[in-house]
Image: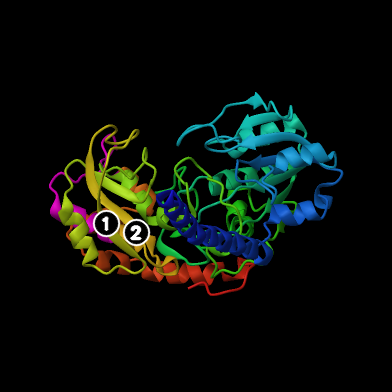
Amino acid sequence: MKRRSLLAGAGALAAAPLLETQAAQAAQAQDAKQKGVLTGAQVLAKDDWKALAGQKVGVISNPTGILDDLSHIVDTMHASGKVNVVAVFGPEHGFRGTAQAGGSEGDHIDPRTGIMVYDAYGAAADKLATLYTKSGVETVVFDIQDVGARFYTYIWTMYEAMLAAVRTGARFVVLDRPNPTGGYARGPMLKPGYTSGVGKREIIQQHGMTVGELARLFNAEYLPLDTNGARLKELQVIEAKGWRRDQLYADTGLTWVMPSPNMPTPDTALLYPGLCLFEATNMSEGRGTTRPFELIGAPYVDYKWAEALHAKNIPGVDFREAYFTPSISKNANVLCGGVQVQITDPHRVEAILAATHMIVEAKKLYPGFAWRTGDNPPGRWIDLLTGSDRFRTMLDGGATAEEIVAAWQSETDAWTARRAKYLLYKGDHR
């Protein structure tokens, strides 16, 4: 009996700190919510969707287009009876998010709302303009959580959708959301001759802008180049309220919804603008693991890579020796050695700098390191991701990580100055 009483007492004592921790976490979450940010979608919903009244609306969105009660804007608009949603356009991964990387859901009728959903992944402006006309769209609404990298395809879906709106005379409304990397601009500029589906216009690798700010820049500078000087009939950005450029996603109090299957956390988004470069190598970028773009490795990698990277003292991150077996993509079902990139200070993370050091050290240590197979010519994908052949040729020429990063600093500085007039939010944006 005494032993049972003692164990029960010990259990209660052990539970007390856990309950206190849970209570503290709940209090912090509530405090964050009270002090937090309102997305453009939340702002518009609180205004009873008035900006869309009397219009036939087409919505470009995915699972990230949520309100504070976690309902999707399309479902809420439809249920309210105050917005006439005549079409939905699904980007990469689809409107409801059922498709993997490089996939979409195809055209279909949404079973929840009965609204026609059109496949917009990879769709050019001509196709979208046809769909706008077919469905009678007068106002196009864009609401997708971006992650701040040039090669994340949602901003280019927005660009083509804007071009289509110019051609059909439709209004364009962006429901803005914070950039998870903050307002920090990093990396090289896309050069002529290296445009693709992961970079249709000249912006830098980590642009440091919200989609609303990018829409303003696109409308002023790039749409006229593709439309004989024309711009949108009307561009309206419903701004996020309470967000500052020096805030990361964890600072906002907003719920994180995966914008794609391999973007599980805000930490993933912080690393993605750099660690995505491993897509262009024969190393796994962690797809098919629980930590994509954090676990990086290959069958030929050993402990030496983690040791070399740890010694670099790269700001905001450290490197843990790790072993993993991806379930899909490169090196599927093969044991890989490598590293887990550990974020030590989110506000100091420079993902492109970290990735550059990682690639330089991998090439130095392992004869098996190579660009991914199937590229024609070899290395084409790293050129498209970085925006030119400079990264690849400097690496192959034996340049250090510091020399590679220094080569694009003037481009970053020029971009930071150029984008200034399109910014909507205050705060440090080095």
**First to last magenta residue range:** 357-379
**Residue 397, horizontal then vertical, whole percent:** 18, 58
From the image, tell me which residue sits under label 2: 342
Instruction: Tell me: 200 left or right of 399.
Output: right
Please name whichever residue, 42 or 208, is drawn nearer the observer in this view of the structure.
42
Nearer the N terminus, badge 2 or badge 1?
A: 1
Instruction: Tell me: 309 left or right of 65.
Output: left
Tell me the element at label 2: strand
**Residue 395, horizontal then vertical, whole percent:** 22, 57
The reply to whether discs 2 and 1 touch (Cβ–Cβ < 8 Å) is yes
Residue at mark 2 to residue at mark 1: CA–CA distance: 7 Å
* Residue drawn at x 69%, y 56% as measured from the top left: 40
State which quadrant residue 117 falls in.
top right
Question: Can residue 149 be seen at all in this image of the molecule?
Answer: no
Tell me the element at label 1: strand
**Residue 186, horizontal then vertical, whole percent:** 42, 64
Please name whichever residue, 25 or 142, is drawn nearer the observer in this view of the structure.
25
From the image, tell me which residue sits under label 1: 320
**Residue 308, horizontal then vertical, whole percent:** 18, 61
* Residue drawn at x 46%, y 70% as measured from the top left: 414
**What is the crowding at mark 1: few (fewer than 14 residues within 10 Å), some, or many (at least 20)?**
some
Above or below, comparing residue 33 to residue 297 in the picture: below
Residue 72 within the segment the image draws in magenta: no
Instruction: Tell me: 18 left or right of 74.
Output: left
Q: Amino acid at mark 1?
A: Arg
* Residue drawn at x 27%, y 44% as measured from the top left: 281
Q: Amino acid at mark 2?
A: Gln
Residue 366 within the segment the image draws in magenta: yes
Please name whichever residue, 152 or 245, is drawn nearer the observer in this view of the structure.
245
